């Protein structure tokens, strides 16, 4: 599915979120900047937008992994165009079976990809394993707002209008119907914090963004 929409993925991300996704990534990067990380892993990196934002911290190395080769290929072209290919290494990899040694990364990020894990517990355990002690985690995910009238507007837009627009521009009938369903099936903000704590993370918390239509989860090891 992600291979099919790779060519239009960046446009649709910014268009369908009204550009707010760019601000969310900046907020996530500010969180990991607090520990001045040098080696960073971006899980489910897609086309690498979050990795590009992370590059502004001037770390030694960023590795972005994804299981969609088409998304990675789009990302690699972006890195070359932005002269970041020496810094950001876009690798094929399964987030639930990370091909890295224990305690490798100072910080780990994920932008709108954790909800796609087939086995959430396994994926989080892998992230915990490859993070150094003292490392920082930052995960962005869509969420359902709880405050009137944003809850009602969200339901209309995200479950009605967004799939229609996504299908029209991407020509993929399943991808943007999958998106709202994946958000509904993902654990609540409070429940996801408990999932992080269950695998060993500490100081796990969430911050609601833009009236609750997204959430930033942070934790430490």
Image (spheres, grey):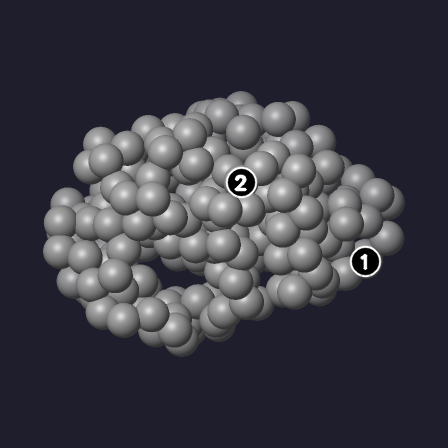
Question: Crowding near pointer 2: few (<14 within 10 Å), some, many (20+)?
Answer: some
Q: Which residue is drawn at the image coordinates 72% and 53% (left, top)?
A: 6
Q: Quadrant of the N terminus?
A: bottom right
- Tell me if 75 is positioned left or right of 100 in this view: right
Q: Is residue 15 above or below residue 101?
A: above
Residue 191: percent from the left, percent from the top?
30, 54
Q: Nearer the viewer, residue 74 or 167?
A: 74
Residue 131: percent from the left, percent from the top?
24, 59
Looking at the rendered structure, the secondary structure element under dot 1 is loop
Q: Which residue is mark 1?
A: 173
Q: Which residue is drawn at the image coordinates 33% and 29% (left, top)?
A: 30
Looking at the rendered structure, the secondary structure element under dot 2 is loop
Image-quadrant location for residue 200: bottom left
Residue 193: percent from the left, percent from the top?
26, 51
Q: How many marks?
A: 2
Q: Which mark is residue 84?
A: 2
- Tell me if 111 is positioned left or right of 134 in this view: right
Residue 185: percent from the left, percent from the top?
50, 59
Q: Which mark is residue 184?
A: none
Residue 68 appears in the picture as rendered: yes
- Tell me if 208 is positioned left or right of 36 in this view: right
User: Looking at the image, is mark 2 or mark 1 nearer the viewer?
Assistant: 2
């Amino acid at each position: 599915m992600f291979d099919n929409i790779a060519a239009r993925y960046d446009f649709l991300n910014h268009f369908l979120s009204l550009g707010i996704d760019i601000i969310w990534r900046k907020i996530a990067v500010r969180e990991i900047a607090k520990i001045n990380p040098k080696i960073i892993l971006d899980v489910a990196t897609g086309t690498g937008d979050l990795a590009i934002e992370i590059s502004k911290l001037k770390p030694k190395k960023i590795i972005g992994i994804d299981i969609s080769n088409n998304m990675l290929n789009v990302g690699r072209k972006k890195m070359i165009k932005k002269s970041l290919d020496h810094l950001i290494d876009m690798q094929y990899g399964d987030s639930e079976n990370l091909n890295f040694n224990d305690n490798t990364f100072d910080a780990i990020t994920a932008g709108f990809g954790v909800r796609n894990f087939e086995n959430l517990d396994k994926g989080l355990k892998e992230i915990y394993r490859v993070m150094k002690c003292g490392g920082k985690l930052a995960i962005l995910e869509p969420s359902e707002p709880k405050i009137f009238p944003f809850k009602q507007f969200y339901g209309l837009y995200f479950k009605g209008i967004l799939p229609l627009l996504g299908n029209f521009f991407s020509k993929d009938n399943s991808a943007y119907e999958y998106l709202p369903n994946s958000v509904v099936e993902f654990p609540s903000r409070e429940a996801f914090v408990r999932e992080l704590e269950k695998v060993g993370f500490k100081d796990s918390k969430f911050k609601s963004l833009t009236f609750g239509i997204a959430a930033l989860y942070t934790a430490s090891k």
